[in-house]
Amino acid sequence: MSTPREELLKTAIYTGPHKVNSGSDNSNFVPTRSFLNLKKAFLKLKESKGKIIHVLGAPGTGKSTNIYQALKKTGLKTYEVSSTLPSIDTSPSQVFKILIADLKMNTGSETKKEAYLKLKEYDVVLFADKFHDQHFIQEDIIGFSLWTRNNTFWPLIFYLICIKEYIQFHNEFKKMNLVFQTAWRLQLRGKKYDIFTDLGWLSRILVKVLAYLFCVVEISYSRAETINIIKSHLKDINQKKIDDALHKFGCRPRLILEYLELP
């Protein structure tokens, strides 16, 4: 009989064929208005340091797809941060310690200050799928998104720890550019929510606050753009099926594609 943790991992492992976890997966891509905005923001990073970009978007809109494609098109030298959390019950302070330990190991550094200084050699330090969704890549690892979804208020403590670290090592951080695939996922009464996109007026307020402090690029699509993306993957799809899926999921191409390809 499966344990609760095993059942949780089973539901997390399947992503479908349209979930992008690296640039090499990004073989079928349709440029959109959001992508062009993201590419424009990334191009500015070639000549600057100390910038922070948050890439927002509802689940299923393809934030990582757009990020990896924009990085490919702009040719930015990228260090992608990964997470290796052992359990969904890991405390916020321990999450941060594991993150720093991984960073020191991957950069061959003795101290975190040394690791931070090595990151300035890159155009971008990226927090995307390998950080949020590492459980889709390695079955025995918990990704940050899975941790946040099952710990409603702990992420706030973790973010406060990160803010304190940023202030303490400001001289080091201003020499690097940070790009975040930004999501804060909650699970309330059996339903999953992203606080930046799924909570109506509260989400809009949070995005405005974030945009006041940082550069924010939101990934979203018009109905026409969504249809173009779907048809680029499913050449002979019936228009009525697309219309039904749009009504069910809204303009979220990945969710629509996975739904339409179900047997």
Image: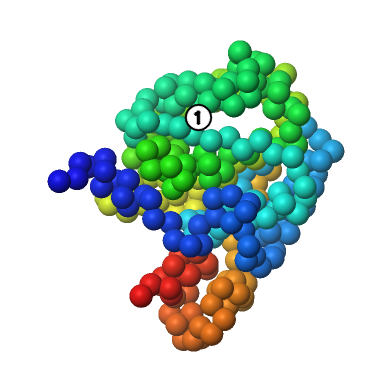
Which residue corresponds to the image point at 63% horizontal and 62% vertical from the top-left?
Answer: 27
In-front residue for pair 228/33: 228
Task: Left or right? Give the position of 255 relative to 126.
Answer: left
Of all residues shown, which one is farthest toward the left? 1
Instruction: Check the picture and name the quadrant holding the C terminus.
Output: bottom left
Quarter occupied by residue 33 = bottom right
Q: Secondary structure at mark 1?
A: helix
Task: Left or right? Give the position of 16 relative to 65.
Answer: left
Location of residue 152 with respect to 14 vertically, above or below: above
**Residue 55 percent location from the top left of the image:** 61, 48
Of all residues shown, which one is farthest toward the right? 47
Q: Dot 1, crowdedness within 10 Å: few (<14), some or many (≥20)? A: few
Q: Amino acid at mark 1?
A: Tyr
Residue of label 1: 159
Q: Is residue 112 visible?
A: yes
Q: Is residue 247 visible?
A: no
**Residue 53 percent location from the top left of the image:** 67, 41
Which residue corresponds to the image point at 75% horizontal and 54% vertical from the top-left?
Answer: 73
Color scheme of the displayed model: rainbow
Which residue corresponds to the image point at 34% horizontal and 32% vertical from the top-left?
Answer: 87
Location of residue 166 with respect to 217 vertically, above or below: above
**Residue 100 percent location from the top left of the image:** 54, 22
The number of numbered discs placed on residues in the rendered structure image is 1
In-front residue for pair 125/248: 125
Which residue corresponds to the image point at 71% horizontal and 23% vertical from the top-left?
Answer: 118
**Residue 46 percent location from the top left of the image:** 81, 41
Location of residue 160 with respect to 8 vertically, above or below: above
